[in-house]
Image (spheres, rainbow, N blue to C red):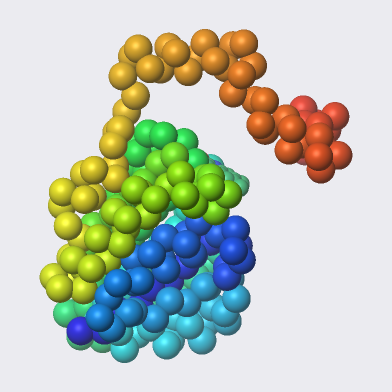
Amino acid sequence: MDTIILNMSPKGNSKKSNSKIICEEFVRCMEKPCEIINIANSNLEQTSQYITDFDNIIFALPLYIHAMPGIMMEFIEYLSPSNTKNQSMGFIIQAGFIESAQGKYVERYFELLAKKLDYKYLGTVFKGEAAAIYMFPRMFKKVLSKFNELGKLYEQTHSFDEEIVLDLGRPYELSKFKAHLYQLLCDIGLNNIGWHRMLKKNGAYKKRLDTPFL
Ligand SMILES: Cc1cc2nc3c(=O)[nH]c(=O)nc-3n(C[C@H](O)[C@H](O)[C@H](O)COP(=O)(O)O)c2cc1C
């Protein structure tokens, strides 16, 4: 059974793409590692034709504004229904914020998409709090090893291991106590320290409240 993995991040094969890092970790210990295509560095139409012969397709994407990146929406326009009706589609989402609940709308869409294209739906894996993986890979050793395990088991079963999916998806929602704590950090501005530093470094700090489209 052949699986193709598509990195849907607009960062493509940049070292700063967390989706790319996760795709590579997913296949790293496979006996026969799956091919990975960085969609941003490919011709969308040609890639959509190339993947039609694979038994399984795994889309790995970052969450952008609680949705999929624009390049993925564009790519979906090129997809055609399954040739055999025995093919499968699965999704791996990673995102900056902690709660995996924010992925529930796009997950519903992915399930429908698979159904509409006559693919079996393998499910959606969601990992929050993942934005800093490329900056501090050592800090994310445990998370990356879970993706590694997920990939190894996927190679044997062609499905996503339920326990690992549950584990990666925690927390689904923050407890009330934690939500209040984060609110407090926001109120006193602690959550913005790193972000503001980056804006200043890029000369964008003074423009951060601009509303160019109003
Ligand atoms: C324009 C933009 C929008 C984003 N929107 C969200 C969001 O709605 N929720 C979230 O949890 N993270 C959001 N993020 C954070 C990304 O999901 C996160 O940084 C991810 O690891 C990026 O993956 P990549 O490096 O493969 O592109 C956003 C990032 C960008 C640049």
Q: Is residue 199 above or below residue 42?
A: above
Rendered residue at 31%/88% (across/down): 53
Rendered residue at 67%/25% (across/down): 193
Rendered residue at 55%/59% (across/down): 17
Outermost residue to the front: 138
Rendered residue at 21%/44% (across/down): 166
Query: In the rendering, at what x and y percent does residue 112 appear?
Result: 28, 58
Q: Which quadrant of the figure contains the N terminus? A: bottom left
Query: In the rendering, at what x and y percent does residue 19 appear?
Result: 47, 59
In the displayed structure image, the side of residue 87 where residue 105 appears, left or right: right
Mark yes or no: residue 70 visible. no
Of 50 and 129, nearer the camera is 129
Mark yes or no: residue 99 visible. yes
Query: In the rendering, at what x and y percent does residue 143 appear?
Result: 35, 49
Q: Is residue 208 above or below residue 52?
A: above
In the displayed structure image, the side of residue 197 where residue 16 appears, left or right: left
Q: Which quadrant of the figure contains the C terminus? A: top right
Of 132 and 6, nearer the camera is 132
Query: In the rendering, at what x and y percent does residue 140 appear?
Result: 43, 47
Of 24 and 58, nearer the camera is 24
